[in-house]
Amino acid sequence: MVRRLILLLVSLIAGTASATDLMDIYHGAKANDALYAAARAQFRAMRERLPQARAGVAPAVSRSGTFKRYIDEDNGGLPALTFGSRRGHGAELAQPAYPSP
């Protein structure tokens, strides 16, 4: 009876030690496996496609502005100069009619 108890305790201790070592080996192999890393990268890329697809149906807002000054010295031979400026402002809001594939 005592012998069985000792064998049981020794097997439990040895089993725990090898399980820890086996888990270390597993994590080390997983960290250095190129195939596993490639599969994880592909998974992350596929998961990113949904937010990118949703961005295609979101409204887009843009604005622009211009300012020009000009001096017209060639006034058909007349000595008068023409000065002026032009300003322009614009805004655009675009909403896609239906989502793109």
Image: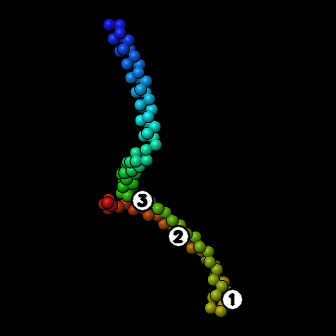
The location of residue 85, given as percent across then percent down, is 60, 74
Q: Which mark is residue 60?
A: 3
User: Between tags 3 and 1, which lies in front?
Assistant: 3
Element under disc 2 = strand
Residue at 64% across, 87% down: 74
Label 3 vs 2, first from the N-terminus = 3
Residue 51 appears anywhere in the view: no
The location of residue 10, given as percent across then percent down, is 40, 16
Q: Is 95 rendered above or below residue 67? A: above
User: Which residue position holds label 1?
Assistant: 79
The location of residue 3, given as percent across then percent down, is 35, 9
Q: Within 10 Å of the Cα at label 3, are there few (<14), some (14-19), or many (20+) other Cα atoms?
A: few
Residue 6 appears anywhere in the view: yes
Q: Which mark is residue 88?
A: 2
User: Between tags 2 and 1, which lies in front?
Assistant: 2
Residue at 64% across, 80% down: 71
Q: Is residue 68 left or right of residue 26?
A: right
Q: Is residue 76 or residue 66 the one in the foreground?
A: 66
Q: What whole-number distance in Å separates the C-alpha atoms at marks 3 and 2?
A: 21 Å
